[in-house]
Structure formats: structure tokens, C-alpha cells
Amino acid sequence: MRRFLFEQTWSAVCLALCVLFIGSRATAQESPYIVTYDHYMEEPGNLDVEYFSNVGTQRGGNDFHAFWTEFEYGAKAWWTTEFYLDAQSTFDQSTIFTGFRWENRFRLLKLEHIVNPVLYVEYEQISEADKTIKEVEGHDVEADGAVPNSVARHEQDHEMEFKLLLSSTFKGWNVALNPLATKNLSPSDPWEFGYALGVSRPLALKASPRACNFCPENFIAGAEIYGGLGDAQSFGLHDTSHYIAPAIAWNLPSGWTVRVSPGFGLNDNSHRLLVRWGLSREFSQVGDLVRGLLGKSR
Amino acid sequence: MKNKILCALTLVTFGLSFFARNTYGAKTIDGQRTADGDRLQPRQFSEFQKIPEKARVRPNPLQTDPDAWAAGKKLFAMHCAECHGESAEGSRKAPNLHAREVQNATPGELFWILTNGVVRHGMPVWSKLPEPERWQIVTFLKSMPTPVVEVAPGEEFRRHSRQAKSIRPEAHKNKTNDGVS
């Protein structure tokens, strides 16, 4: 309990510091995707602080509320680095910290093309109790979530995850496909595979001349499908779970973005319902601010 | 133990990010540090020379749209001003958009730069904005006043070499109505 309190307090302090000390806000055009990635990177020097919730149903166990915080920083126009802190509450059990992830995305081509590739590399150290379901890989199935927290939290995974983010935008429509491969750093575990596919479009393609919260161009609607593809020893769709999730993002002129995405399991191995929502805010030129705090000229 | 590792990794992550930012961010968009840190050299606009002819001659479909300028101004404030400055006067990391190179560029050239960015020099890709919104920004950019080159009497031969350092878009503000030429 003390450890959990420390972790939560620590997360809260990080968020508070960001909000208090970071300078001006920036307005981004965030996509509605929660699992899928498009090829757009964080603007250089900007920090996006995001909070997400994932409430899910669990057959054979208790429903849960998983949540995570993301710190996404644009190191370069072609390189975005992101740090995650994951936690979950399983109803009538406990609330636990489940681990962290560090991801990096590298834009591979200089110019825009019909299909734009981005390389995604992530290291994660999470416990088996993690229920954020940020991606589905291998033979991940709903039954995995039925293990009580008191048991699952002691199983720690150290994994490397690689994705090829393929994304295309045409006439306002974005289509993104993310094949993924994951390797547990334990030598005996095989490579696991998965996919995510997303489609989205703003509700209006032209901006209105006045500042407004409810203008249709502030809303981007879409849908994503994601699931597992087995592992190197048994590649395929058997014993895998799959989801479809309509999604909408509301980009407010104040710099906040709200995302909502109910997800529905597509087979008996999937959670029946995953309700996700997120709140994020982008802060501009954090690098300059830090240099200023360190006394360097801006 | 886990908490210590967590804290250490967080510090390393942000440390690396800020190191990259500090190492590369202090350069201007052509990778050369400028003498005074704030002014930009004209050669930074060399990206215009790489634009394909087909894109260069592309007309602005919203040129006569009565709302395009105001919408472009709004979009500029939302997405561009943080680097280029609220009045597009430029900064250490992004060029002055009142500069002659920008104002002499065709709408198609500006649209191409917006769409493709100048990724290796720090300008992100803006194709995430729908095409009409990018044209609205182009409409706003093309309405900006052209630069004034301050030349002291007897210094005319040095005009061109000092051009970028002498750009003073502020001088136009009193001559134009809200930035519209």
C-alpha cells in the first residue's frame, strides 16, 4: 500500500510539475487512435502529457479499470520519444502499479509519400497484471486477465517491441497499418506478432474563420481494428483475440484533446467491451524552457 | 528497488531527449549556428530549390475564398506561431516568413513546404492538416508584407550580404491593415 501511494504520488508530482512549470500550450491536431499509430511525429521541442483510462469487462474474473500516463516528447522532427507509466484497479481486488514503457519512433523518409513508414522501437517492463491493452500480441486472450492481481503482479515481463508504422493520408482520410513483433527478453519465449489498422478523417476539411470549440474541424472520427497473430511457433488466428473500436478525438483550441473509444471484442477470446477515454495537453517548446531554467541562452 | 529503477530510467529518458534538443536545437534550420543566434541567413531558404515544377505551379484553389485569410490566420496562430513567432517574425529555430524568399514563393511552393516539412532541419510535416486548411495557411502567408531592407547611405553595396539581418517586418505594421497587403 505504501509503495502504491508512493508511485501514485510520484506520478501526480510529475504531472503537476509539467503543468506548473511548462510554458505556453500548443494546439495539436491529434488523431483519435488509441492503439494505432499514424506517421505524424510530435513537433520538435513539444511535450504532450496524456492520461488514458481503459475500463473492461472480464468473464471468469472481476472487471477492471486500467490507466496510464504518457509523456511524449518531440526530440527532432523525425524522432519522437515517449515514456509510459501503467497501473490498474481490478474491482474487489486491488490497485497496483504494473510497469513502464519507453518507446521511440523514427521517421524513415524525408518527404511525404503515398505510404509513409515509421520505425517504432519500445522497451517495456510490465507485470502480467497489466491490463492497459495498448496492443494485442501473440496469443493474448481474455482469460489472461482472470488471474488475480496478487498472483499476476509477481510475473514481470521484460520485452522489446518493434512496429512498422505504415500510414497514408489522402483527401483528409488517414489509413494506418501497424504490424508488430514482440520478443520477451527471456530466451525461451518466442517472437509474438500482432497488428493494428486504423482509419480516420476530420469532420470538416476547411477551418472556420473564427475560433470555436465545437467547429466540425475540431473533431476527428475514425475506427481501429487490432488483434494478435500468434507467435513464431504457432502463427495464425487460433487462440487470439481481436477488437474493433470506433474512436473520436476532440481537439480544443485551448490545447487540450479528448479522446473516446469504445472497443468491442470480435471473438470469444476477446473482452466483450473495453471503454477507453483519454485527456491530453501539449506544451510547446519545453526544450527551450529547460535550457532557460538551466541558465542557457534561449 | 523498482521505484529506484523507475526514477532512474525516467531521468535518463528525459535527459537523453533534452540532450538531443540542446545539441541540435540550437542550430538554425540549415544546421549552421548564426552569429547573433536570432537572425536567419537567406540560404536557409534553399529548400525552395528542391520543389518539383509540378508542385511549384499549383494554384491556390482558395485564393478567392472570402474566409480563407481569416481561417489561415487562425490556423497559423494554432500551429505555426510557436516556432515562427506570433507575427511570423521568425526565431532561432524557424525563419522569418516576411522574408523575400517566402513572399516571392508561389502558393504551390508554400503548399509543398507545408505538406512535406523540412524534416531534417526541424520543420515537421503538416500533411496531418487537411489540404484545404493548408491552402488557407498559404493564403494567409501570401498576404504578409514583404520585407524592408534598411540601408544606410553609402552602404548600398553591402545591402545584399546583410539582407537577412536587416529584415524588419515591424516596419510594415503601420502601413498595412492587420497584416493584409
Image: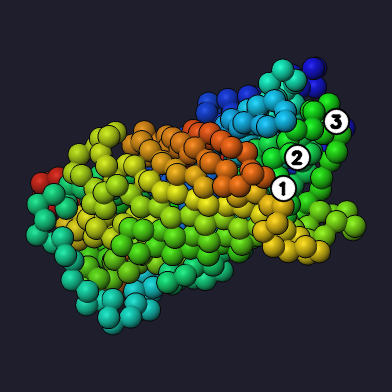
Residue in the image at 78% along x and 57% along y: A183
For the residue marked with disc 3, what is the amino acid?
Answer: Val
Q: How many marks?
A: 3
Mark 3 in CB contact with mark 2 (< 8 angstroms): no
Picture quarter containing residue A188?
Answer: bottom right
Q: Residue B157: x and y, percent?
A: 26, 75
Residue in the image at 36% along x and 36% along y: A252
Q: Residue A229: x and y, percent?
A: 67, 59
Front position in the image: B164 or A236: A236
Q: Does dot 2 land on a helix, a strand or a loop?
A: helix
Which residue is labeled 1 in the image? A140
Q: Is residue A196 above or below residue A147?
A: below
Dot 1: within a 10 Å radius of its alpha carbon, few (fewer than 14), some, or many (20 or more) residues? many
For the residue marked with disc 1, what is the amino acid?
Answer: Asp
Relative to residue A75, is residue A158 drawn left or right? right
Mark 2 in CB contact with mark 1 (< 8 angstroms): yes
Which residue is labeled 3 in the image? A151
Rounded to the nearest angstrom, the CA distance separating label 2 from label 1 is 7 Å
Front position in the image: B156 or A93: A93
Visible residue check, residue B81: no
For the residue marked with disc 2, what is the amino acid?
Answer: Asp
Front position in the image: A130 or B37: A130
Which residue is labeled 2 in the image? A144
